[in-house]
Amino acid sequence: MNYVSTRNNDIKVSSAFAIAHGISVEGGLYVPESIPQLDTKDFANLSELDYIGKAEYILKKYLTDFTDEEISACVNGAYTGSFDDDKPAALAQLGDKINILELWHGPTCAFKDLALQLLPYLLTTSTKKAADGKKTVILVATSGDTGKAALEGFKDVENTEIIVFYPSEGVSPMQKLQMDSQKGNNVHVCAIKGNFDDAQSGVKKIFTDAAIKETLAQNGMEFSSANSINWGRLVPQIIYYISAYCDMLAKGDDLSNGFNIVVPTGNFGNILAAYYAKEMGVPVNKLICASNANRVLTDFINTGVYDRNREFYTTMSPSMDILISSNLERMLYILADGDDKYIADIQSQLANDGKFTVNDTVLAKLQSLFFGACCDDDGTLKTIKNTFDEYGYLCDTHTAVAVNAYEQYIEKTGDNRPVLIASTASPYKFAKSVLSALSNDIPESEFDTVDALSDLTRTTVPTPLAELKNATARFKDIYKKEDMYTAVCNCLKIN
Ligand SMILES: *Cc1c(COP(=O)(O)O)cnc(C)c1O
């Protein structure tokens, strides 16, 4: 299986190369040349396996240049002992049709752990194969959850350094403390004055700058990415949708007419993984793309016009506060039947004008696959309260956006097939907002709020968050967004 760049079909690389390098030289993203298919026999085999077994089975189809032993070592390293009950992707059920895929039982309590516990193993294996064993410098732009999950995944991993940039005003207090208190000898955390898109653009710029690349090479280093622009981040996410499908079948859900998947979306990585699962053979009907007030994707799905020239809102679902959804590029490449010139063209329009319009063919395909809906913070709070009142289920702010979008979908279409809603974070990561949906009595301190939420809802605080109570901040630097390269040099002690 080869991987091609979305902006130049002549660039064909192995999966190890794609993972080691993160992004293609001309700025394109790597996509698999074809999508592996699962037949009835595959699903029968998969249903006999535990999560680790399923992960191996699926990865073998995508990472064909890895040996079976390498894949097995990666997967076992990632998923043994790092998730509650060794179940990275547990299902909860609300009523008889709604399944919640709880993806936050890992070390940082957000779904990014599923990919970022595995990525360091994939990456170190890949660099040995395809990057001459240079030291890998992982640059991460984060709206909160990726940063912490990447830091946990990469801390003290041999031959790597990791530098995380986050918007100083754009993450929750819990997320900030999680990152600033990170332990490890190869980790660096920098706040920047700007929003997530600034951080992401800055990182992309550093990645693709030839002179910077040369400087790194002279120091025996090479950049890679732990953001979902890296294929090694996406492929682990396909696994849990296939696993959830097997679990839904096993508990007797009637999936004869397929089911819908709802994903609270920011960078379009998680929902793209759901799309891959669908194309592989999971009987998914609609992919429901849920956004918060930064509704650029909702508008895009409804109109075919992608326009980032709009007000940026800082919301209570900060991991979705994004106006440039990087992984949409992969989706559009597929919808445009691999027309690399077309993708290069619309991406340069996006870079230059902040805007592009897709053609009618692409729009029709997009709308047949996806339904887009959004809600603001008020809607988020109402949904948290209603979901708790109706089902006794406490969801975080991001998951609530998904539940809200699902309700809009039902209202509009009447489609009552079974549904799988991706739940992307523990409610305790956003305790203040979640508690404020249920009570007017909000304590001053973050940890009193956590305790109040636990008392009110009789739910348990995840251990990694409870333990933060005693953590102290170790990183305090705030950089201007223009100074991100300086920050990199400072962290790596090069100039
Ligand atoms: C990252 C994140 C999202 C958005 O996922 P994408 O793959 O970027 O679309 C949603 N919810 C939470 C809690 C996240 O951390």
Image (cartoon, rainbow, N blue to C red):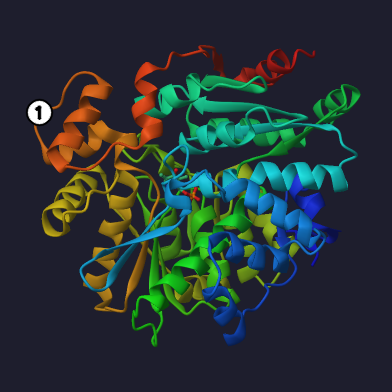
**Image point 62% across, 43% down: which residue?**
351
Horizontal side, residue 132 vs residue 82: left or right: right
**Image point 60% across, 37% down: which residue?**
153
| Location of residue 174 in the rendering, given as x and y in whole percent from the top left corner | 37, 27
| Location of residue 70 in the rendering, given as x and y in whole percent from the top left corner | 77, 54
Quadrant containing the C terminus in the rendered view: top right
| Location of residue 75 in the rendering, given as x and y in whole percent from the top left corner | 64, 53
Horizontal side, residue 317 vs residue 383: left or right: right
> Residue 216 sits in which quadrant?
top right
- Residues 127 and 461: in front is 461
- Residues 268 and 388: in front is 388
| Location of residue 283 in the rendering, given as x and y in whole percent from the top left corner | 47, 80
- Residues 212 and 278: in front is 278
Q: What's under tag 1, amino acid-wise?
A: Asp
240 vs 437: above or below: below
The image shows a total of numbered marks equal to 1
> Residue 434 sits in which quadrant?
top left
**Image point 80% across, 58% down: which residue?**
66
Q: Which residue is mark 1?
A: 441
Which secondary structure lies at badge 1? loop
